[in-house]
Amino acid sequence: MRKMFLFVLAAAALLLMVPAQNAQAQGQSETPKVEVGAHYTLLRFRDFSITDSGVGGRVTYNLSDNIGIEGELNFFPQKRSTSLTAFPLFVDSTRTQGLFGVKTGLRSEKAGIFGKFRPGFVHFGESGVVPGQSFTQFAMDVGGVFELYPSRSVALRFDVGDTVIRFTNPNLVSSTFNSNNLQISTGVAFRF
């Protein structure tokens, strides 16, 4: 995790050294305001030794070249099992993740690098251990985003983040803990 953070930090420093190109001189207008995209994502549940893959969608509204507000929804269809009886929510359940927050950073005509801060939730579907019950846990995604702009209307996006999930068992409050989980996503967005 530390190596990934240092990589994102080094990439940000390199982007700062590259002078931003003037989009007006190239006949381009300002950064498109709305981005709608789809992506593939991996989420590594560190404390449970489980890696899930899923798909998702994202909508971003760019307030300026440097700040955007975004919402993301991911679905992980795999049903997994775990031996942790204090947290039956992992047994035979799918997961849905929703994250809503900001990204801020630097953007040139061809690339951008951003930091992201997005609170949200992870919902665990009906569990085989507790039939008919589902659980929703608080989540916080903090990380970095690298974007490439092959054209004005298309963006390729690569995310790396620490998705912190606050696990609370509703039946056993003393077993509450925070779990740091690596999440990597890659996808494409259409810009309007």
Image (cartoon, rainbow, N blue to C red):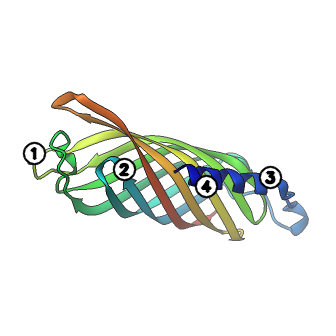
Whichever of labels 4 and 3 marks the residue nearer the N terminus, that label is 3
- Neighbour class for label 3 at 10 Å: few (<14), some, many (≥20)? some
Residue 8 percent coordinates (x, y): 64, 54
**Distance from Cα at disc 4 to Cα at disc 3:** 14 Å
Whichever of labels 1 and 3 marks the residue nearer the N terminus, that label is 3
Taking the spot 71% from the left edge, 68% from the top edge, the residue there is: 152
Q: Secondary structure at mark 1?
A: loop
Residue closest to the eye, 109 or 160: 160
**Distance from Cα at disc 3 to Cα at disc 2:** 33 Å
On the rendered structure, is 154 left or right of 106? left
Q: Amino acid at mark 4?
A: Val
- Neighbour class for label 2 at 10 Å: few (<14), some, many (≥20)? few
Q: Quadrant of the C terminus?
A: bottom right
Q: Which mark is residue 145?
A: 4
Residue, disc 1: 130
Residue, disc 3: 16
